[in-house]
Image: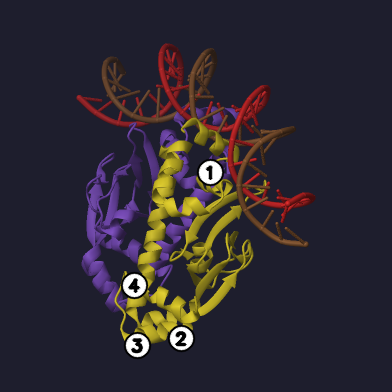
Chain colours: A yellow, B purple, C brown, D red
Amino acid sequence: MDFKQQTQLLIKHLKQEVSLNKSAIEKLTSIIKFKELNKKEFLIKPGETANTMNFIVQGSMRSYYLDENGQEHTLQLGIEEWWINDLYSYLSRKKSRMYVQALEKTHLIRLPKVELEKLYIEVPAISNFFRIKIQSAYVAVQERVIDSMCDDAYERYDKFRKSYRDIEQRVPQYIIASYLGVTPEFLSYLRKKHS
Amino acid sequence: MDFKQQTQLLIKHLKQEVSLNKSAIEKLTSIIKFKELNKKEFLIKPGETANTMNFIVQGSMRSYYLDENGQEHTLQLGIEEWWINDLYSYLSRKKSRMYVQALEKTHLIRLPKVELEKLYIEVPAISNFFRIKIQSAYVAVQERVIDSMCDDAYERYDKFRKSYRDIEQRVPQYIIASYLGVTPEFLSYLRKKHS
DNA sequence: GAAAAAACTTAAGATATCTTAAGAAGCTCA
DNA sequence: TGAGCTTCTTAAGATATCTTAAGTTTTTTC
């Protein structure tokens, strides 16, 4: 996919939420940066500050937290036409404690925060778009808190499969386990038990 | 505390984050609504839609989710000078699935969403204030997801006590248990074990 | 101030989930 | 194509947390 097609995909994606005129599209296009990551390559590492919004054009990514025992905890998973970031670092301007990593060879569009915030003033539709995105991010995380308290591991796995069927196919099981908050061995056991 | 004093408390609270001129304060004051809740009284129940931002002037509150097994899961706790809401419902305009309840006799200031959003246009400082609040809410919830995956129950309890010492004193232990995601019996056991 | 209600504790037995370790299966790259 | 790495499975024993039930303490209400 060439840069033009990639840009088109982003525009199409924004237009699903808000309407954009020619001038808005031009302005947006002018701040776009393209980035390619190889499998397992990192976009963000702990200590860095997230200063772009990142749209997945092709490929898949995840963000995860590495705890003191060396265990990974996956916070977010994403494939084509999803946004991936450490929103905590991006919003607060603080250093990230996450890894944001490509799970496959991945093409991204990055929108630098400084330029994006200037754009918000000129093009309120774009500001609205990201407000909506951040609100959905909040809702999704809150949903996860509730699920982690109400559901046992198998129920969480089942919900995950139903909500993210296309992601489940492409992501190794041990990463799904680290998203659900269980060990890979236990997830394997649950799969067998319920099959 | 009379209405004037309550209003002063809110203004003082906003001024800790953003600066407000006389006209901004006047406009804000004009949309304020006061509300008093008795102990155990509900501000929001499942099926209702949250249509105000709620500032606790005096007292304490919580929001919780009641699951299919009749178990309560506390999502948020708050005392004087905290905001309490079902932000999910407020932001998405969807029906709430939460209870928002007073834990003591409580005085609230409510800012109706419709009027507040009009204010955002005239007074960007107020818009900024709530943007910051919503961002911190996001960060807090994400922190909780991480903690629930990395820490065992005692570590979570310990962090809770350190972060919310003043809340811990005023809230029954079974509610703290329901915030931490454990049974009251188990929390009681942990407290004894580590004392 | 007594009775009732709410909150907390204790303890025993049950269950969910983890740890460790080893082997099997699947993928990747020379 | 084969060797080496990565991922998945299995199973046994360990641990964290829950359930139930009963008794105690604290708070609320009349």
Q: Is residue C3 left or right of residue B144?
A: left
Q: Residue at (25%, 59%) from the top-left corner? A: B3
Name the spot of residue A170 as percent of width and height, x first.
Answer: 51, 54
Q: Which residue is mark 4?
A: A128
Instruction: Provide the secondary structure element on which disc 3 rests.
Output: helix
Asked whether the beta carbons under mark 1 and mark 3 sit within 8 Å of each other, the answer is no
The mark total stands at 4
Distance of label 4 from label 1 (alpha carbons): 33 Å
**What residue type is disc 4 on?**
Asn
Numbered disc in front, either 4 or 1: 1
Residue type at tag 1: Gly
Residue beneath disc 1: A181
Element type at mark 1: loop
Image: B61 above or below C20: below
Q: Which label was assigned to residue A23?
A: 3
**Occupied quadrant, residue B10:** bottom left
Instruction: Say which mark, if any, is on residue A69.
Output: none
Give the residue displayed 35% in from the left and 71% down from the top.
A129
Q: Secondary structure at mark 4?
A: helix
Pick the front one: B190 or A194: A194
Do residues under tags 2 and 3 come within 8 Å of each other at their CB atoms? no
Q: Is residue A173 above or below residue D24?
A: below
Q: Earlier in the sequence, mark 4 or mark 2?
A: 2
Q: Respond whether the residues carrying marks 1 and 3 are from the same subunit.
A: yes
